[in-house]
Amino acid sequence: MKYLEPSKEIDVFGEYDVIVVGGGVAGLTSAIASGRNNAKTLIIERFGYFGGTATASLMININGFRNQVEPDSTQTVKGIAQEIIIELYKMKGLGKSPYPQKEYDIEKGELSYSYCIDPEKFKYITLKLVYEAGVDILFHTYFSDVIKNGNELKGIIVENKSGRGALFAKVVVDASGDGDVSARAGVPFWQASSDDKALKDNIMYKISGIGNADFGNCRYDDSSVVWGPGGVWGQNNAWEISKAEIKTRLQIFEHFNSILEKNPQLKQVGAYVAETPPMIGIRQTRFIEGEYKLTADDAITGRRFDDVIAISSCPIISYYGYRRYLEHEGYDIPYRCLVPKDIDNLLVSGRCISSEQQPYESHRAMAPMMAIGQASGTAAALSAKNDVKPRYLDVSVLQDTLIQQGAELRKR
Ligand SMILES: Cc1cc2nc3c(=O)[nH]c(=O)nc-3n(C[C@H](O)[C@H](O)[C@H](O)COP(=O)(O)OP(=O)(O)OC[C@H]3O[C@@H](n4cnc5c(N)ncnc54)[C@H](O)[C@@H]3O)c2cc1C
């Protein structure tokens, strides 16, 4: 059944050089980079803080600053991602990662493969950095549609407490994780069906009151976040996401009881379920078709690209059912994976960039996601300021800017 919505005049909420849709790790780093490159920037986010999966779904292990195993001598992600980790370190906001890895000396500015973060301190630091970059922030705001003229994106339509409004931009960065903007704009995309080898969704939850008990996957202070019930498949369908929330949330206490049974010390110290996050952790949905699609071979062979804008050295976490570590220092992510087919004035950032399943299972980790975010925001700002469509941006200028601003590109 369909309903024909009557057309009506709506308010214009603002006009910007760059609008970033979504404040997950990819979106927040994109907004910081855009703001720091002097573009008039707005970020919209449906929750009241940044972090997306990292905070709103309590996924508090940030992986991927270098290879988890040897060869791991190159730190492949630096820039804004590194800055966030150093700020967290100064605030005592880092915990020990549950992943086996060689520890590098953060005092010397060298990051290890993975860190566990305190999500509240992460919310604080990321808000501070976005705010200090001079970015306008619209929280509790939902992207709902695009404003287009032919193949050119002109802006977006949002919904929030103020009603429905239009926002115009020279460049929009789709950091919604799900590729919402790109899909609405008509960019072709693919997504795995439920019977494919796609990574399924899990609800994470926090156990507190752990005291001295010898327990903890992602542990900070007196708490630990655990991988809760999962195996469900939310996709982009509100009914399916609701079903996934219902199914996993109804299993939380049964899950917790099984943890208590296996860890009697937790029972003794009186550990309890302290928090379930606002949202189940969604691992993968749409993948946008870009000017280049990363392949399994690119990741496995450690391919280098002339238009590199970020690097991933993370394992492919479910390569034919096993965790396949990379036998090299990382593969390049080309700028073309952020440039969608068919639609202009749009860049894609984060987990929905143009990729096949297997490389996605590597660069989905949050450190490379933040490097991609920094690149997308920098590219958006350069495009807007120079009045050039992102598709035609001089990539060498983008790369030079990224390197000057601390990113690692291993450029020859
Ligand atoms: C259960 C689970 C375990 C994981 N384990 C790890 C791990 O151990 N280590 C690791 O590094 N990575 C892990 N990952 C992967 C990693 O967390 C994600 O790939 C990464 O966080 C994705 O970042 P993103 O910014 O692209 O997307 P998201 O985090 O999905 O952010 C998208 C943002 O956009 C907002 N948004 C979406 N749609 C709209 C809309 N229409 N309007 C307004 N706002 C919108 C969302 O609220 C969100 O803030 C895991 C993921 C899951 C789900």
Image: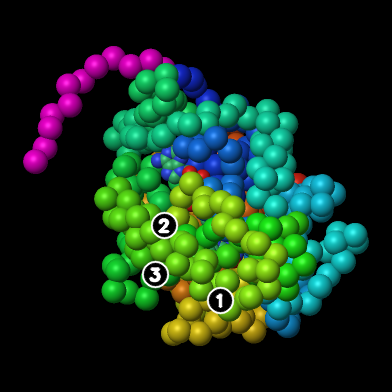
Residue at figure coordinates x 70%, y 65% from the top left = 269
Q: Quadrant of residue 133?
A: top right
Query: In this rendering, does residue 287 appear at all?
Result: no
Q: Residue at x 50, y 85 (%)?
A: 322
Residue 318 visible to an observer of this rendering: yes
Q: Residue at x 79, y 64 (%)?
A: 111
Q: Report the mark closest to the observer, 2 or 3.
A: 2
Q: Which residue is label 3 attached to?
A: 231
Mark 1 is on which residue type? Glu
The first of marks 2 and 3 along the sequence is 3
Q: Between marks 2 and 3, how big is the CA–CA gap? A: 13 Å
- Residue corresponding to mark 2: 249
How much space separates mark 3 and mark 1, taking CA atoms?
22 Å
**Mark 3 within 8 Å of ligand 1, using the beta carbon:** no
Of 157 and 299, nearer the camera is: 157
Residue type at the position of mark 2: Arg
Q: Which residue is mark 1?
A: 261
Q: Amino acid at mark 3?
A: Gly
Give the x, y percent position of residue 114: 70, 66
Residue 62 coordinates in the image, percent (x, y): 65, 61
Q: Eyeballing the image, is 407 above or below 65?
A: above
